[in-house]
């Protein structure tokens, strides 16, 4: 393993791999990515539902989606392998007047930024798109036909493979034990495989980003929150192009995932923690709500359950940029459940911050670490 590097990236999920690739395309010097697991994408990246969407409530998230989904949709053209992008359309179900007003405002913003195919829906239009869904209490909804799903594992591994071909070094099974600030500037990254001297460290550790921050005396407000979902066996009545349905009030969602459906819901009472254990009581709550909205599920069989971790910030936006109090230490984490879908854009803008001093592709300057202590948080309202 390298004993010195121009840039050390901590975390080999979709963010770290994307950043390594984008830095390598710019000939950024010696790049070393460290991943503590035996393989890449074994953390949050490999334990998510694969959703990709344009329907967010803030300009920066919408712009990150516009850039990132363009890459994901053209992945095979760009890299020679499909990202399994499936434009099912995210179909949001809205059940209160307040939600209707919020989404009307969101749709206007999304359209103003170039997402011209997003639109509001009446209950009758929703029924036409998803006739098997129980629409009791639903007042309306929204859909963007280009929202959908993609494969996080393929995207991550492809970025990593491309980065290696361009000269980046990736070390798996390498745990970061400590980071020491050096008197003359820069850092010593201490790992189980040896120490690395570097002028720049990028924290892409996702749910564990706060722990990495503590190693250098930084308070990074990112907490790990368990999110779980399950897969069913085949449900012949559900077409494979059925929309990705989200009940906004409860965060219940379901979409086709071969051979059946993938179903999940956020536990609003979840407390921070790193467990991947299934909460069986909440699984039953999810199942009950899912059967209410999609009665056909009553006859389906659950074939798999999986839990992953959201990397949640107080405003549901990531932290992107250099820590003002610690020159040379950068953060790319805290995506609050939408990291995979924004990983192409996040890797791009972080490479610009590192090499050009500022992001150019998308202005993410408002997503600095200091916004929390300075009262500049920007709340993303469309996170489930």
Image: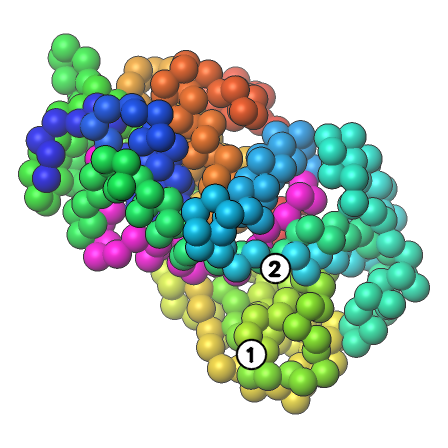
Left or right? Give the position of 156 relative to 146.
Answer: left
Mark seen at residue 25: none
- Above or below, comparing residue 280 to residue 309 in the picture: below
Left or right? Give the position of 344 relative to 2.
Answer: right
Front residue (pair 156, 62): 156
Mark seen at residue 86: 2
Q: Residues within 10 Å of mark 1 (few under 14, many from 20)?
A: few
Left or right? Give the position of 154 relative to 114.
Answer: left
Identity of the residue furthest to the top in this view: 184
Taking the magenta stretch, the answer to whether it contains residue 384 is: no
- Above or below, comparing residue 278 to residue 23 in the picture: below
Main SS of residues in magenta: loop
Which element is circle 1 on? loop
Taking the magenta stretch, the answer to whether it contains residue 47 is: yes
Q: Which residue is drawn at 38% across and 32% down?
A: 22
Q: Residue at x 29, y 19 (%)?
A: 328
Q: In which quarter of the image is residue 326?
A: top left
Q: Residue at x 71, y 63 (%)?
A: 243
Which element is circle 2 on? loop
Q: In which quarter of the image is residue 85?
A: bottom right
In the picture of the structure, the residue carrying the numbered disc 1 is 259
Q: Residues within 10 Å of mark 2 (few under 14, many from 20)?
A: some
- x and y percentages locating residue 118 in the rendered image: 78, 45
- Above or below, comparing residue 308 to residue 188 in the picture: below
The image shows a total of numbered marks equal to: 2
């Amino acid at each position: 393993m390298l004993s010195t590097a121009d840039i050390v990236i901590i975390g080999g999920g979709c963010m770290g791999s994307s950043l390594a690739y984008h830095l390598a395309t710019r000939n950024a010097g010696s790049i070393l990515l460290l991943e503590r697991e035996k393989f890449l994408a074994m953390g949050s990246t490999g334990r998510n539902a694969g959703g990709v969407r344009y329907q967010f409530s803030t300009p920066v998230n919408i712009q990150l989606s516009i850039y990132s989904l363009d890459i994901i949709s053209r992945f095979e053209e760009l890299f020679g392998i499909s990202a399994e992008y499936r434009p099912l359309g995210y179909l949001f179900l809205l059940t209160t007047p307040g939600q209707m007003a919020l989404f009307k405002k969101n749709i206007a913003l999304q359209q103003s930024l170039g997402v011209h195919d997003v639109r509001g829906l009446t209950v009758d239009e929703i029924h036409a798109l998803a006739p098997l869904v129980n629409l009791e209490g639903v007042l309306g909804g929204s859909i963007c036909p280009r929202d959908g799903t993609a494969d996080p594992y393929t995207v991550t591994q492809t970025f990593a493979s491309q980065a290696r071909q361009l000269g980046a070094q990736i070390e798996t099974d390498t745990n970061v034990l400590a980071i020491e600030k050096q008197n003359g500037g820069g850092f010593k990254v201490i790992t189980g495989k040896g120490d690395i001297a570097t002028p720049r460290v990028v924290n892409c550790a996702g749910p564990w980003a706060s722990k990495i921050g503590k190693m250098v005396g930084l308070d990074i407000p990112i907490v790990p929150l368990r999110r779980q979902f399950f897969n069913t066996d085949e449900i012949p009545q559900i077409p494979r192009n059925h929309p990705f349905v989200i009940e906004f009030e409860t965060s219940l969602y379901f979409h086709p995932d071969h051979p059946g459906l993938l179903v999940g819901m956020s536990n609003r009472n979840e407390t921070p923690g790193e467990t991947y254990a299934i909460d069986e009581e909440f699984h039953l709550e999810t199942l009950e709500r899912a059967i209410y909205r999609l009665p056909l599920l009553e006859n389906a069989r659950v074939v798999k359950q999986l839990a992953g971790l959201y990397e949640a910030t107080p405003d549901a936006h990531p932290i992107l940029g250099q820590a003002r109090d610690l020159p040379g230490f950068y953060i790319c984490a805290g995506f609050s459940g939408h990291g995979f879908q924004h990983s192409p854009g996040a890797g791009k803008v972080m490479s610009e911050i590192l090499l050009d001093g500022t992001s150019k592709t998308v202005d993410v300057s408002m997503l600095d670490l200091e916004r929390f202590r300075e009262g500049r948080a920007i709340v993303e309202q469309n996170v489930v």
